[in-house]
Image: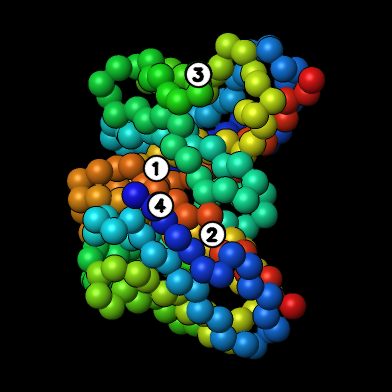
Amino acid sequence: AQSVTQLDSHVSVSEGTPVLLRCNYSSSYSPSLFWYVQHPNKGLQLLLKYTSAATLVKGINGFEAEFKKSETSFHLTKPSAHMSDAAEYFCVVSDRGSGGYNKLIFGAGTRLAVHP
Amino acid sequence: DTGVSQNPRHKITKRGQNVTFRCDPISEHNRLYWYRQTLGQGPEFLTYFQNEAQLEKSRLLSDRFSAERPKGSFSTLEIQRTEQGDSAMYLCASSGQGNEKLFFGSGTQLSVL
């Protein structure tokens, strides 16, 4: 079965410093991996998606993630944090649903706090 | 594209009452999903519709839960005889055929007293 583990429940950084949110995955086949962000009172928003085309994936708002098969990792990074990045971030793996669709399996989330 | 719309945004009910939530997906999307998110956890899959057909239901969806999508457009999720453990955020998402990108609504926050 597909699963993801987010290694940190909370991460706190200062504005302007790098962000690293860690995620390990478990998959019996070549996975599709995603990062979603959830701001308070807003819907989940897709940051980026990996589907085997390139190991380094660039997303919105300056975020990127690198797929490392040897480490079964898909960590999310950003060179310089902004106050507006404070939110909950979810690492997600796609599983094959019985209806031929892709069912998303979410990690427990990492809450990112950004301090002035 | 007005996004995925969910109503109500918040629902407070007493234990034992029935509640119904509505989801309006993006108009051209034929795939619709329900997820449930409890405090401090990621969303968990509940059920999936392709057009009006409900193709998969999670074991999380007990007999008290029923979801419909009668005309392949909007969907409803009903919980009968609510329990305090049903308190959660209920999220709806939609996607187009063959597209892995899901668009999520803002959710309905259910509180069972």
Q: Which residue is mark 3?
A: A62
- The answer for which chain carries disc 1 is A
The picture places residue B68, in percent across and down from the top left corner, at 35, 76
Mark closer to the observer (4, 3): 4
| Residue type, mark 2 in image | Gly
Residue B70 sits in quarter: bottom left
Please say whether residue B33 is visible from this viewpoint. yes
Q: Disc 4 marks which residue?
A: B3
Q: Give the residue type at disc 4.
A: Gly
Q: Which residue is mark 1?
A: A2
Q: Secondary structure at mark 3?
A: helix
Asked whether the residues under marks 2 and 4 belong to the same chain, the reply is yes
Percent across and percent down for residue B14 are: 70, 83
Residue at numbered disc 2:
B107
| CB atoms of marks 3 and 2 within 8 Å | no
Q: Residues within 10 Å of mark 4 (few under 14, many from 20)?
A: some
Q: Nearer the viewer, mark 1 or mark 2?
A: 2
Circle 1 sits in a helix, a strand or a loop, which is it? loop
Between the C-alphas of marks 1 and 2, the distance is 25 Å
Q: Residue at x 35, y 27 (%)?
A: A50
Q: Looking at the picture, tell me which residue is in the foreground, B6 or A88.
A: B6
C-alpha distance separating marks 1 and 3? 28 Å
Q: Which mark is nearer the camera, 2 or 4? A: 4
Disc 3/disc 2 C-alpha distance (Å): 26 Å
For the rendered model, the colour scheme is rainbow
Sequence-wise, the earlier of marks 1 and 3 is 1
Q: Is residue A63 above or below residue A79?
A: below
Q: Marks 1 and 4, Cα distance to the nearest angstrom?
A: 28 Å
- Are the residues flagged by discs 4 and 3 from a single subunit? no
